């Protein structure tokens, strides 16, 4: 067993860290100001300019197949890079990536949706959640009814990330209510121009998802993504990827926050000594370090399982649960260590505190991860410590 990074992994990680520190982190004060004024943290043009710079360093299409100009990196390396991205709260992501299920596009759809989405000239979003179906996605109700060469979509979606900027959405709808999620859901590529309407949802964090209303929206049959009836499987595939990307980012954020706490604990003095000499402060630092490292190895295990070509769902659920809950405990302790200053808007801790809360909710809540992990054990599908077998 070898816990060391390879030379290549270390070099890629260090280059990414230097890039984020030099090009992205300096934008943090401006991002805080803009968010507080209710503006977008980064304009589309600013993000694309940063992505173009990152491309010069070789960071383009981390998980994108080489055939599309991507780096097609192993999941472990991608996870390491997502952690580097997570070290800043600037909403930066490397370019050249798109929704993983968009690779199911056929030749015609490839030109119209996949390639522009990879290049960043057309933005996408992914819509499965509905007002009455979030954790239980088998309960979605949006209907798609075939009418000649079209499908007619009616219903609502909600909490859709990147929906404000999206030129098109991947929408999961019910095409056969009797079959339900077992072959009765289908994925559609739906251009904004086809007529869905939307409203922005205000949240406690920087996220500004949208709700979408579909009122007799006609979608040509050629816009079916994958096969008719394949929608639930595609939705699960889309969500599955997030289960190691989100905690990878959470690890980067926790690393940076813990670093701030260590620094503060050596500088801030009370009762004649640095607060880092008080045992209760030390306990918070130590617990954070232990939990951060535990989550890190679970996340890398999930990514490694992907690279092994094995089913990563069990490990990914553990990684998502561990990463999201760990980051929330760490940011809370880091705020505590900073005392009153931690609660102010002079420091970004409160901002991270609000953002981190989302990690426990979207792409499968804590409870849904626990449910999946426990069901795997109870059914015998997974053995305790089975990944070592
Ligand atoms: C900012 C944001 C961005 C999002 N982005 C997207 C997006 O881009 N696309 C998209 O389709 N969706 C998106 N979502 C939706 C998100 O994935 C759901 O909100 C999430 O899965 C939870 O669903 P829900 O809100 O309906 O909660 P519910 O499913 O109603 O759950 C309510 C509570 O009950 C618990 N619960 C539910 N079932 C069980 C159970 N069996 N056992 C124990 N507890 C249970 C849940 O854990 C939760 O605590 C986003 C959400 C947010 C807030």
Image: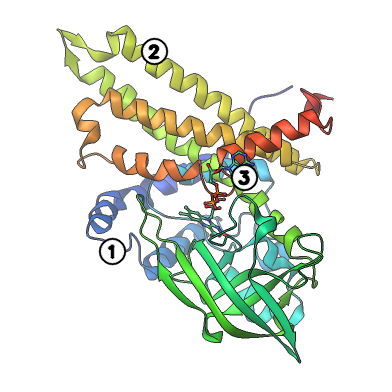
Q: Secondary structure at mark 3?
A: helix
Residue at 20% in and 31% down: 341
Label 2: which residue? Answer: 283
Residue 262 x %, y %: 33, 22
| Camera-side residue of 384 and 292 | 384
Residue 97 x %, y %: 59, 62
Q: Are marks 2 and 3 in contact (CB under 8 Å)?
A: no
| Residue 33 can be seen in this image | yes
Residue at 58% in and 54% down: 134
Label 1: which residue? Answer: 39
Label 1 neighbourhood size at 10 Å, few (<14), some (14-19), many (20+)? few
| Dot 1 or dot 2, earlier in sequence | 1
Q: In screen coordinates, is 228 left or right of 251?
A: right
Residue 202 x %, y %: 35, 59
Picture quadrant of residue 283: top left
| Dot 2 or dot 3, earlier in sequence | 3
Vertical order, 243 against 126 (above or below): above
Q: In screen coordinates, is 176 left or right of 258?
A: right
| Dot 3 or dot 1, earlier in sequence | 1
Residue 170 x %, y %: 62, 70
Q: In screen coordinates, is 238 left or right of 340?
A: right
Mark 2 CB within 8 Å of ligand 1: no
Q: In screen coordinates, is 89 left or right of 218?
A: left
Q: Secondary structure at mark 2?
A: helix
Vertical order, 360 against 122 (above or below): above
Quadrant for the C terminus in the image:
top right
Q: Are marks 1 and 2 in contact (CB under 8 Å)?
A: no
Residue 243 tag number: 3
Residue at 59% in and 85% down: 216
Picture quadrant of residue 117: bottom right
| Camera-side residue of 250 and 7 | 250
Vertical order, 69 against 389 (above or below): below
């Amino acid at each position: 067993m070898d816990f060391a990074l390879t030379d290549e992994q270390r070099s890629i990680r260090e280059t990414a860290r230097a890039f984020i520190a030099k090009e992205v982190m300096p934008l943090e004060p401006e991002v805080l100001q803009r968010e507080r004024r209710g503006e977008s943290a980064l304009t589309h043009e600013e993000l694309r300019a940063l992505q173009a710079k990152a491309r010069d360093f070789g960071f383009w299409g981390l998980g994108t197949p080489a055939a599309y100009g991507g780096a097609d990196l192993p999941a472990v390396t991608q996870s390491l890079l997502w952690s580097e991205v997570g070290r800043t709260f600037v909403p930066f992501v490397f370019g050249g990536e798109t929704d993983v299920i968009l690779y199911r596009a056929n030749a015609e759809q490839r030109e119209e949706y996949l390639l522009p989405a990879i290049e960043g000239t057309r933005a996408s979003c992914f819509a499965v959640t509905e007002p009455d179906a979030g954790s239980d996605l088998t309960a979605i109700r949006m209907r798609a009814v075939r009418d000649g060469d079209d499908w007619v979509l009616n219903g609502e979606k909600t909490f859709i990330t990147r929906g404000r900027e999206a030129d098109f959405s991947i929408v999961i709808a019910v095409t056969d209510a009797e079959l339900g999620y077992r072959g009765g859901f289908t994925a559609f590529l739906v251009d904004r121009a086809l007529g869905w309407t939307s409203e922005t949802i205000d949240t406690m964090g920087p996220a500004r998802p949208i709700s979408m209303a579909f009122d007799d929206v006609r979608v040509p049959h050629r816009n079916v993504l994958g096969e008719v009836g394949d929608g639930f499987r595609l939705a699960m595939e889309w969500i599955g990827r997030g289960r190691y990307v989100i905690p990878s980012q959470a690890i980067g954020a926790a690393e940076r926050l813990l670093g701030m706490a260590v620094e503060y604990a050596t500088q801030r003095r009370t009762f004649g000594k640095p607060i880092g000499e008080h045992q209760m402060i030390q306990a918070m630092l130590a617990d954070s370090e232990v939990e951060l490292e535990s989550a890190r190895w679970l996340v890398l295990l999930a990514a490694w399982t992907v690279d092994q070509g094995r089913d990563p769902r069990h490990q990914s659920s553990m990684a998502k649960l561990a990463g999201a809950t760990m980051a929330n405990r760490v940011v809370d302790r880091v705020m505590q260590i900073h005392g009153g200053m931690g609660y102010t808007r002079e420091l970004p801790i409160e901002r991270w505190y609000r953002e981190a809360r989302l990690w426990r909710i979207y792409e499968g809540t804590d409870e849904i991860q626990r449910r999946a992990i426990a069901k795997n054990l109870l059914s015998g599908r997974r053995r305790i410590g089975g990944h070592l077998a």
